[in-house]
Image: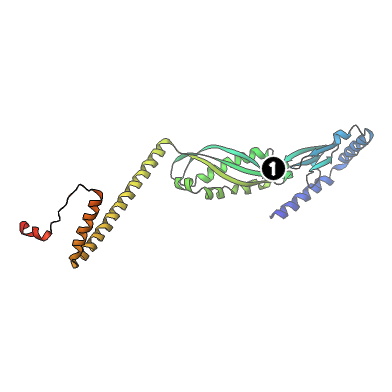
Amino acid sequence: YSFEQKRKYQIAIVLYNNTHLGCCGWLLVIASFMLVVVTFPITLFMCVKIVKEYERAVIFRLGRIMDRKPKGPGLFFVLPCTDTFVKVDLRTVSFDIPPQEILTKDSVTVNVDGVVYFRIQCPISSVANVSNAHHSTRLLAQTTLRNVLGTKNLAELLSDREGISGSMQSLDDATDPWGIQVERVEIKDVKLPHQMQRAMAAEAEAAREARAKIIAAEGEMNASRALKEASLVIAEAPSALQLRYLQTLSSIATEKNSTIIFPLPIDMMKAFIK
């Protein structure tokens, strides 16, 4: 059923209950009303009630819901002998999910805690369909968190926070018959065992060292290629080697003035080498 169909069905039930109080019920209502009239204005303090802007009152007359809509905010009237009412807070409520010890899909034990934000959307359903709406929502949130995280790997649990929050929104479907709308579910903290933390740190350090060695090897390979291309250019132009000698002398003279270098052509050393 759609939300409108459920609402019409609920209103029909409420109207049926309201109009079928029975003969004894109507006699009690009339007697209570006459008692209010006779003892006026003493009973005025018992009949006039006030609810705040963020509250609603669900009125029961002889145990039946009196109206299709809750009363409030502001003033409303009740009969002292036959009517009772329950105040419902419509503000958003947040509560912490206690740390849950969960076994992930890859057999890793972790402690996870979260926070849930919800509010009462239909006061009549929250009073008539569940005994304690807040406590029931907390227990259901704990169970849903364990069921959702049990299907995730450790890597997904640490990185995919948004996906887990989206999966936890299935809690809203379960609380809809209670008149509660779950606005948001967030994972606060994931606690790993100390041994697992050390193992992950060692794995990350080894991965960083491996990447550093790969980068150094790639740098040496690129440098060797550049030196090979430079040697080919110098071989094609012998005067380039003399220019290179002069450039080296200039850089050495700038940094170390006490060093004296005498350039010796390599061609003069060939006779000694042979």
Task: Give the residue at x 40% y 36%.
Answer: 195
Q: Secondary structure at mark 1?
A: loop
Which residue is depicted at the point 21% across and 55% down? Answer: 249
Residue 154: quarter of image:
top left
Residue placed at 64% from the left, 44% from the top? 118
Q: Residue 266 in the image: x percent, y percent?
A: 12, 59
From where the camera sits, is residue 274 visible?
no
Q: Residue furthest right?
A: 38
Looking at the image, residue 247 lies above or below residue 171: below
**Quarter-wise, where is residue 83 in the image?**
top right
Residue located beneath label 1 in the image = 91
Residue type pointed to by label 1 = Arg
Q: Outermost residue toward the bottom? A: 236
The one of 225 and 95 positioned closer to us in this rendering: 225
Between 88 and 177, the one lying in front of the other is 88
Percent across and percent down for residue 15 are 81, 48
Q: Quadrant of the N terminus?
A: bottom right
